[in-house]
Image (cartoon, rainbow, N blue to C red):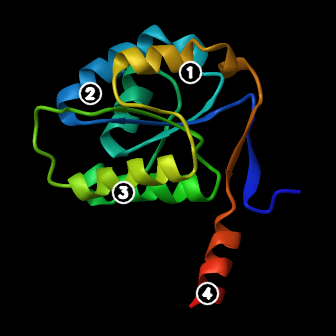
């Protein structure tokens, strides 16, 4: 048994976070409308305004957290750690300065740490959503952080 790695499993029903910067909200709404039949099979959450707009305009339920600048990105990051989010679709606006950029970077970092799929644009979101893995359980190996922390503490 490899104590340095743990097997993580993403179930058939994905837990997807939907996030969009202001300049990309309409693109997110259009994308959700185009992919409504697939998205409604999964558990969806999102940051404040994005979640509310998708629920109201597209008609699929999205659990809303705070707006990104008010801590929503950090809330979703916490849900990743808890195993309550296992995929992110984040239509970020690369041409607009974001006052909460450190929060966005922290969210993307924690998604990388926990090895979950992240789409930062429509093309990548299409590839993820239309992958054969969307209809399957998916298991993958991640670092055993408890073991890593224990080893580091013992070496100090």
Which of discs 1 and 4 lies nearer the camera? The answer is 4
Q: Which mark is residue 155?
A: 4
Which of discs 4 and 2 lies nearer the camera? The answer is 4
Q: CA distance from mark 3 to mark 4?
A: 27 Å
Q: Sequence order check: which comes first, mark 1 or mark 3?
A: 1
Question: Could you say which is closer to the camera, residue 139 or residue 61?
Answer: 139
Q: Quadrant of residue 134?
A: top right
Question: Residue drawn at (33%, 24%), measured in percent from left and top?
Answer: 121
Q: Secondary structure at mark 4?
A: helix
Q: Which mark is residue 106?
A: 3
Q: Sequence order check: which comes first, mark 4 or mark 2?
A: 2
Question: Residue drawn at (44%, 21%), measured in percent from left and top?
Answer: 125
Q: Looking at the picture, does residue 30 appear above or below residue 50?
A: above
Q: Are marks 4 and 2 in contact (CB under 8 Å)?
A: no
Tell me if mark 1 has few (under 14), some (14-19) or many (20+) residues whose alpha carbon lies within 10 angstroms of its own: some
The residue beneath circle 2 is 25
Question: Could you say which is closer to the camera, residue 146 or residue 82?
Answer: 146
Q: Sequence order check: which comes first, mark 1 or mark 2?
A: 2
Question: Could you say which is closer to the camera, residue 103 or residue 41?
Answer: 103
Q: Quadrant of the C terminus?
A: bottom right
* Left or right of 21 in this view: 74: right
Q: Which mark is residue 39?
A: 1
Question: Could you say which is closer to the camera, residue 115 or residue 21?
Answer: 115
Q: CA distance from mark 1 to mark 2?
A: 17 Å
Q: Residue 144 at x, y = what percent?
A: 69, 62
């Amino acid at each position: 048994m490899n104590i340095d790695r743990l097997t993580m499993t993403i179930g058939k029903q994905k837990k997807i976070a939907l996030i969009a910067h202001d300049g990309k909200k309409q693109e997110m709404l259009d994308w959700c409308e185009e992919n409504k039949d697939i998205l409604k099979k999964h558990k969806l959450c999102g940051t404040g305004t994005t979640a509310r707009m998708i629920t109201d305009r597209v008609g699929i339920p999205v659990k809303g957290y705070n707006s990104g600048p008010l801590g929503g990105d950090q809330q979703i990051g916490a849900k990743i750690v808890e195993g309550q989010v296992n995929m992110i679709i984040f239509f970020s606006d690369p041409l607009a300065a974001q006052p909460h950029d450190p929060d966005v970077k922290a969210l993307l970092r924690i998604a990388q740490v926990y090895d979950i799929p992240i789409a930062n644009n429509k093309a990548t979101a299409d590839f993820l959503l239309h992958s054969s893995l969307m209809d399957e359980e998916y298991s993958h190996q991640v670092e055993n952080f408890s073991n890593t922390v224990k080893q580091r503490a013992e070496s100090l």
